[in-house]
Amino acid sequence: MTATAPHFGPPPSVSAIRRPLAKAGLLAALVGVVFGLLLAVAGPASAHAALTGSDPQDGAVVDTAPKQVTLTFSEQVAVGEGSIRILDPNGKRADTEAAPLDLHSGSTVKYGVALHTGLPDGTYTVAWQAVSADSHPVSGAFTFSIGAPSETTVALPESKAGGGLVGTLYDIARYAAYAGFIVLAGGAAFVLACWQRGAGARPLQRLVVRGWMTLTAATLAMLLLRNPYTGSGKLADAFDLDGLKAVLDTKPGAALVSRLLLLGASALFIAVLFGAYAKREDEREKKDLTFGLAIGGAVIAAGIAGTWALAEHASTGIQPGIAMPVDVLHLLAVATWLGGLAALLVALYRTPDVTADAVRRFSRIAFGSVLVVAATGIYQSWRQLGSWSALTGTGYGQLLLVKVGLVAVLVGVASVSRRWTARLAAGGVAVAAPEAGTEAAPEAGTPAAEAAPDPEPEPDLMSQDPASQDPTSQDPARAVQLARQKAAVATAERKRVRDADPDRSGLRRSVLAEVGVAVALLAVTTILTSTEPGRTEEEAARASSAAAAPAASGPVNLTLPFDTGGENGKGTLRVDIDPGRTGTNVLHLWIEDVNGKAMDVPEVKVALTLKSKDIGPLPVVPVRLTEGHWTSTGVQIPIAGNWNVSATVRTSDIDQTTVDKNVKIG
């Protein structure tokens, strides 16, 4: 019996619940091999949107003010009015403050905002915030300059979207939602599949009901916090009705509302499970009701798990049609496993008669859950990582390694639990002590029975003389005090009898240790759900590195032969662009005839075009310096790329030609 957390991550090694340790080790090795193969052939996946490009680019210096600023993302994002803001050097809005324009083209996700005309030179700040397709807010900022860089009063934000107090509360609610679902679904499954008599046990009833209450409260909190979480970050906006209405129109908002509706159905399920089902005496009727509750409960649990799959990581990226049902299976398997473990822990400590047979059945179910978690975890890890480098070089991958370490500890504890389970199964006796306030004699032949003292015969009070009876009968306060003392002695005796069986005590301790490690795993996994996946982090880093790559170390040199078709129309044009990087450059032109001598022409013009970004042609009008030598200063290259340099040479009033060549600049 081991425990894990409910989300994507590296698959845990199969514990030796029902298999020898050698077989468990072999299966773990096979899982590792499959995991490695999947990572080796991994292609691009998508989750957390990343900014992959912009026009103008970060740090670019443009000659004239652009008509609009465009942003390109790695995946679909939700934007609204104010999602993209352009601020001038004084911090005032330089854009028209209209909703971003949708400039999608094929698979390219691009949005743009129009700028005011007549913007002065200086440094402008682009601040953006959006919600990625996996429901997580993303944000960022960069600068570009018109004419030349200048001082700016705008400070780039240091905090990211989804942070602060609201982000902390939202993360707590997310954690509570996972924990509530695990306890609700797993506790109910434990009762139906492992220990049906537990439906009448108050401790198990309280456990499942508290799981339902936790999940419901957490879902309501997430619904209210969703608006400030993805927007302003102000806690007061949680009660903004307009914001709440906007949230309901989004995919995450619809998923949270659907979850609340399904929780209403689950309340009816709980009422039947711990009401009519617990009181049912007829075995045939109880069997039919068990089947009905199992089907109904499975449908409700799958629906609740689907509210995560439909709104978060599984719903975006490659193979969403496969990823979403796989995610549902992953959550259901973890809930059955970890929730059943919590129910078993409660039964061991708080109920009088949980049997070794129930523990044995849970071991079989837990083993099956481990296999499902392993298979689905491998697939989801492949989608989120994409490469071995992301496993060690990104925050997401490092958290996965932490989770692997916790799973290793959990497997060790599980091997201990397996030994206690086997010993109890061999005895076939009840494995828990009576609940406080009840009396239950230890069964014959058990260590508890041997340790218990012989009961003393009760005195026949009716045969005693009234004068010799307990004097406290005349003193109610004294009677209450003695009753408390007797209750304390009885409680201590029951605890001594309970702890006298080393098998019971050992199983309780090992299961408690498993639950403790499982809580840590749940915390790590909850952090993973709000961490940018390794694949996306690497993509964003590559895009940033490309944008910030060092400029070329020397000027760009081109040689372009030309022939205008007229008399003396043949020659060679040499083009030098210095320093050949983004920003301001100087262009030199040398024109020579077929003999290599300087050649004078009436006119020469140059144009620069970056076709990949739909920039240009940017005209350059050079000035004649001497015979065959032309130049132009202040040539602006806005962004790096594969530029097309075209030159038009006129050798007479009617004879001219245009030649061009592609060259990488910046």
Image: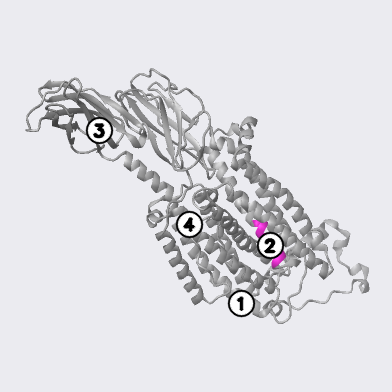
Q: CA distance from mark 2 to mark 3?
A: 70 Å
User: Which sits earlier in the primary sequence, circle 1 or circle 4?
Assistant: 4
Q: Secondary structure at mark 2?
A: helix
CB within 8 Å, label 3 to label 1: no
Q: Nearer the viewer, mark 3 or mark 1?
A: 3
- x, y percent for residue 125: 39, 28
Q: Earlier in the sequence, mark 2 or mark 3?
A: 2
Q: Nearer the viewer, mark 4 or mark 2?
A: 4
Q: Earlier in the sequence, mark 1 or mark 2?
A: 2
Quadrant of the image occupied by residue 470: bottom right
- Mark 4 touching mark 3, by CB under 8 A? no
Circle number at residue 422: 1
- In the picture, the disc for residue 645 is 3
The residue carrying mark 4 is 381
Identity of the residue drawn at 58% across and 34% down: 235
Q: Is residue 432 left or right of residue 107?
A: right
Amino acid type at circle 3 is: Val
Residue linked to disc 2: 189
Q: Is residue 614 a member of the stretch shown in magenta?
A: no
For marks 4 and 2, give the CA distance. 27 Å
70 relative position to 519: left or right: left
Q: Secondary structure at mark 3?
A: strand
For label 4, count other residues whose C-alpha is less than 10 Å away and answer few (under 14), some (14-19) or many (20+): many
Residue 412 horizontal/vertical position (percent): 51, 69
Q: Residue furthest bottom?
A: 445
